[in-house]
Image (tube, grey):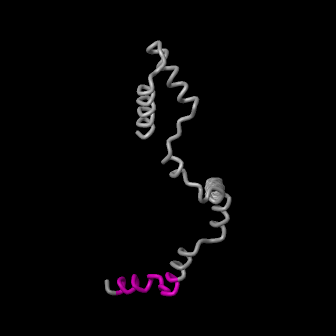
Amino acid sequence: MACNSRMLVNELPATNEAQPATTAHSRLRPSFSAVKRWLREPLLHFFLIGLLLFGIYAYLNRGRSGTQSSKQIVLSLDELRTMTAYFESQWHRPPTAQEFQAMVEDKIKEEVL
């Protein structure tokens, strides 16, 4: 039996310690064919075009923030006329100055909310 165990030890392949290091290094470095495969991927093209469009839009609209315009409430003449016409259709008379002022304040409160 002693001979058999020696033969088994002798039959094991010799390991080269430099080989696993190069294999691990080659695993970390992507191959050129893998890069070419990724460059042909349509999803990558879609993502890059979307990123480009987003960048162009952000560049063209820099400095224009919508927060300043939302702080100001503007009622046009058409909106005021519509409010007056609605009041007249409901009450069959034009609104008084106080009623009109109350309608405008209600409209402003509605816009704020």
Q: Nearer the viewer, residue 15 or 26?
A: 26
| The N terminus: image quadrant | bottom left
| The C terminus: image quadrant | top left
Q: Residue at x 49, y 15 (%)?
A: 89
Q: Nearer the viewer, residue 24 or 41?
A: 41
Query: What are the residue bounds of the magenta stretch?
Result: 3-21
Residue 19 in the magenta stretch? The answer is yes
Q: Is residue 89 left or right of residue 102?
A: right
Residue 90 in the magenta stretch? The answer is no
Q: Residue furthest top?
A: 92
Vertical comparison of 27 with 34: above or below: below
Q: Residue 40's quadrant in the figure?
A: bottom right
Question: Percent position (x, y) of residue 103?
Answer: 43, 28
Question: Percent position (x, y) of residue 26?
Answer: 56, 77
Question: Percent position (x, y) of residue 105?
Answer: 42, 34
Question: Percent position (x, y) of residue 90?
Answer: 45, 15
Vertical comparison of 48 with 21: above or below: above
Q: Nearer the viewer, residue 34 or 68?
A: 68
Vertical comparison of 69 with 90: above or below: below
